[in-house]
Image (tube, rainbow, N blue to C red):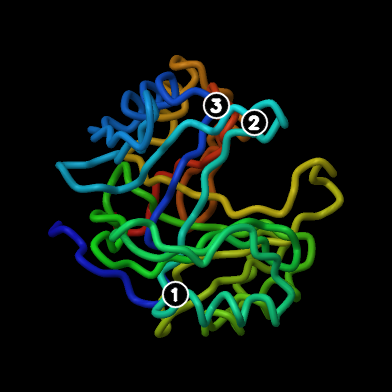
Amino acid sequence: MSKIENHPHGIFCWSELCTHNWKEGKAFYTSLFDWGYDDQPIGEDIYYTMLQKQGGDIAAMYEMPEEQISAEIPSNWLAYIAVDNVDDCAAKAKELGAEIIAGPHDVMNAGRMLMLKDPVGATVALWQGNEHKGCKHLGELNTPYWHELATRDSKVSRDFYCALLGWESEIKPMEGMNYILFLVDGQPIAGMLEMTSDWPEDIPDHWMIYFAVESCDTAVNKAASLGGQVCVPATDIPDVGRFSVICDPQGAVFSVIESVIDDV
């Protein structure tokens, strides 16, 4: 598949890991997904690492500042959504009840970004690409495949993202619940589920990143052998695929999915 050179407005375009241990985190993910990497210095012995497939950037990682680690902020993955004008989106997000965490600001010549906490508390970033548009490979194995919002108020969440980004929504009944699909130009680009009382209270509203894998079970076993913790064991979703939720050795949570849909 050819490299992606641009991402339309409203499409998830980048994934970024902020980790307690950059060296060990890099070893875990490059081993698990067979990624290459390009360490770009951003300070004394500090790097912004481009994680790569076939030489193309697909995600990035960096070490969390010591003061944040001391404040017990967990390692985490952050999802970025492409937008045409990040400043306009910042103003609109505030009107819709979001909290601006950082930005809008330029990231050198790469682009302009904004990090926000949506009205239910989930964190996400917006990206207006310049020299760096985002992920170069999508719809392939070992790349970001799906993004899913877990929320305690699906109506508030749906109204917010549809108003902010122009997303459409569609209800898809699944195993006793109504799963929400978000669409751009009629194509599903993300999903949403409502957290029930069965979910532990300490799990916040969040966006989950799923990485496509050839075999869910193989990926789970490999992650465990590398020091990861399996939070949700390999589980089948009818007509969708087999997935698992994993916590990396530094505490960041992500998912893997073996899709049965012919789109990888």
Percent across and percent down for residue 238 are 52, 54
Q: Quadrant of residue 223?
A: top left
Q: Which mark sits nearer the N-terminus, 1 or 3?
A: 1
Q: In front of the other: label 1 or label 2?
A: 2
Give me the C-alpha separation between circle 1 and circle 2.
Answer: 33 Å
Residue tagged 3: 20
Front residue (pair 205, 73): 73
Kind of residue at disc 3: His
The amino acid marked with disc number 1 is Gly
Q: Amino acid at mark 2?
A: Glu
Determine the image quadrant of residue 233: top right
Q: For the N terminus, which image quadrant?
A: bottom left
Q: Would you name the residue on which mark 1 appears?
A: 10
Q: Taking 82 as reference, is 144 above or below it?
A: above
Quarter occupied by the C terminus: bottom left
Whether residue 95 sits left or right of residue 261 in the image: it is right
Q: Which residue is mark 2?
A: 67
Label 2 neighbour load within 10 Å: few <14, some 14-19, many 20+: few
Q: Give residue 181's mark.
A: none
Q: Residue at x 58, y 58 (%)?
A: 102
Describe the element under mark 1 as helix, strand or loop.
Answer: loop
Give the spatial CA distance, label 1 vs label 3: 30 Å
User: Residue 253 vs residue 138: left or right?
Assistant: right
* Helix, strand or loop at mark 2: helix
Cα–Cα span, label 3 and label 2 = 11 Å
